[in-house]
Amino acid sequence: MTTIEDLQRGTDSAVAVAAPNGAGSATTVPARVFTPRKKKKPWKSWLLFLLFAGPNVALLIVFTYKPLLQSLYYSTLQWNLGSASAIPVGLGNYVTWFNDPGTVRVVTVTLIFTVATVGGGMVIGLLFAVLLNRKLHGRGAARTIVVAPYVLSGVAVGLLWLFVFDPNFGITAALLDAIGVASPPWYNDPHWALVMVIIVYLWKNVGYVALIYLAALQSVPRDLLEAASLDGASPVRAFRNIVLPLLGPTTFFLSITTLLSSLQSFDIIQAMTKGGPLEGTTTMMYQIYQEGFQAGRAGYSSAVATILFAVLLVVTLIQMKYVEKRVHY
Amino acid sequence: MTATPTFTINRRQILKLAAVFGATATLAACSGPSLGAGAGAAEASATDWTGIVPAKEITWWSNHPGTSKLIEEEIIKRFNVENPEITVNLVTAGANYDEIAQKFQAASGTNSVPDLVLASDVWWFRYMINGQILPLDDLAKHLEFDTADFNTTLYDDYTFTGNHWAIPYARSTPLFYYNKAVWAKAGLPDRAPKTWTEFDEWAPKIAVDGGVTPLGLGKGASWAAWWFCNMLWGQGGAYSDEWTMTLDTPEAIAAADYLQSLIYERKVATVAAVDQVADFGAGLTGCIMGSTGSLTGILKAATFEVGTGFLPEGPEGQACPTGGTGVAIASDRTPEQQLAAGMFLKFLTNSENTAYFSSNTGYMPVRTSARDGETMTKVYAEFPQFRTAVDQLETTRSQDWGRVFVPNGDKELTTALEKIMLQQTDPAEAFAVASVAIATSFDENVSAYL
């Protein structure tokens, strides 16, 4: 039997055809793959490559890789934003960050915010998706309502919720007052402030998770569920043993995308708390902005950005290496 | 279900990748600051202005303080009547002073630098040590600016090493606002308390008879550490003496103790959740310290009659900081552009336009002639509250360097004050943390550039 490895040992063109078919269908491919084909001239394929990929690669280089490397370089400087000159300090900025007494707080806030928004978002999003997948009256409207906040601008959402949470005039205060509870000090207590921005972030972004899960739920084969039901499986059991595993790849995809956007979120914090009070909502992302543009410490801010980048890279690699293996396709 | 894309990489691909990264890295290193010791402020220019012809077009970055876009456009129109050969492009470069500063600093070294830029009290110094703005004394002399007519404190706010680096424009101070209806209910005289001791006597009456929390306090960056100057200086303390932090003095601690006691012991003050001005306007608090820049807004929004007065005195007397913004000229422009910018700056801050701007926005008239002129006299007649703000100007002083000149200075002080106000932290402890952080920031970010 021909395996994918055999194919890879073959000609370049064989690999090119076989790879997209993937491991699962390897056995069906060989007959076609080994049909002798005229090899393309290398410069021609390069030209094609440049034509199709060139503009994208150029944009990536100019707007992603160049700034990335530039920021890496700036992180070794002691440089006031706006100044024409800078002093090289090597790893000094990194040493400062790791020794700063405020770093523990920033990392803790970042961790709590990320875990709560990613974990909370996945659970609530899945719950919404399951509900919206049922044949309910007004399902279309409900789907729109759940997804709508996701397409709104973060700043607008932040400004709106600024009023909702106002302990004197806000809706939450009025609702809590109706059941005889005083409004928590959302804006004057660093812990409540963090809870508040997490709630708003979830409200805005849960629609995205729900949308993706909903799409995945609709592609779960109905016959599997019917078979399970015939075999006497309860709906809960069918969900746990059939639907959840089938949602594996979606969950994996969502875990990466929501983690990345959560660690990089900025707009809601900027609009609602500006990282306060007492820096209780200052995440690493917000710290980068604050140090770079408020304090003008461009080098230090670049160092924090590099650390955040390294964290994101490592977390994503771990997810791809370990979590992906456990996902059932 | 789709198949897993297999991700393998061979030696050749790694080499290609490395080449791409290498090329990008080379590209990256091409831009950015030059290396070496800090360049520092721009030198007083040796430009001989006499032979220079002003440029035909200049750009001005503003955030139109006090919703003044139409006012600024009108002033440009008037300028063009006198100088039809110079076009002034007014650019909305941000929603506040910070956003302008962020863009101005990011534009440094590019050809997108404006000729004129707003330089607020906490930003002009940074522009200066970065070498981004021009010392103005020579140019002002050449253009015969009447600088003696400026309010001395406001003009000298922008002095360092013997040069002026900006011209006062939209300037403000904190002001004491009180709810006249509450005052009447509490049986108090229709005026602001003269001293904090007097406020202490009045506060229980405001709470009990007036039925509101007597004093509303504001928190947050660019704000708390500004109004606190009043309590701090009133006790004889200061944030810093030039570059040396002085928050460990008994006077500074006494000021913070007093602030804390208002909230926790006497319970006559509350820290606003979002906006102390809105809380005051809604009648939740009896009085606040607000910016003179909020005067027009407060008078419009409040459903009760609003009284204004000087900030209360401390044991060491009257103490009020200045604030707001000036206008600076960028150093990285041609002498022709700088000359044209100087001509417009002179026009923008002349007596007539100062009065026009002030009367329409509520900012302080920065010139004595404008303050006493016909336009402003009419305004005082209509809004006597405005007169109080202008009179208080005589008692103001420039801010401590530790707050306004050191990067993160305001942020560290805000954090310290929030700890004191929101968490009842021991003032000595909170101030000690801030002092160390500000001193470190000075060493790292300022001293190398001086």
Image (cartoon, coloured by chain):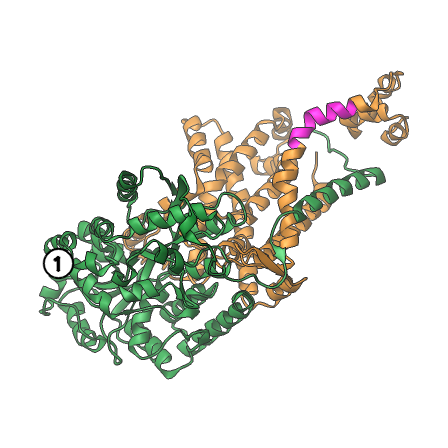
State which chain disc 1 sits on. B
Residue B418, percent across and down? 39, 67
Residue in view at x 59 percent, y 57 percent: A85
Q: Quadrant of the N terminus of chain B?
A: top right
Q: Which residues are magenta?
A: A45-56
Q: Is residue B373 left or right of residue A63?
A: left
Q: Secondary structure at mark 1?
A: helix
Q: Quadrant of residue B166 in the image? A: bottom left
- Vertical placement of B353 versus A61: above or below? below
User: In terms of secondary structure, what is the magenta stretch mainly?
Assistant: helix
Q: Which chain is orange?
A: A
| Of A74 and B325, the residue lying toward us | B325
Residue B258, percent across and down? 30, 77
| Of A266 and A318, the residue lying toward us | A266
Q: In this rendering, does residue B221 appear at all? A: no
Q: In this rendering, does residue B356 appear at all? A: yes
- Vertical placement of A99 versus B265: above or below? above
Q: Which chain is green?
A: B
Amino acid carrying mark 1 in the image:
Pro
Residue B267, percent across and down? 26, 71
The residue beneath circle 1 is B384
| Of B360 and B280, the residue lying toward us | B360
Residue in view at x 59 percent, y 45 percent: A260
Q: Is residue A226 left or right of residue A278?
A: right
Q: Crowdedness of circle 1 by 10 Å Cα count: few (<14), some, many (20+)?
A: some
Q: Is residue A171 left or right of residue A105?
A: left
Q: Is residue A319 magenta?
A: no
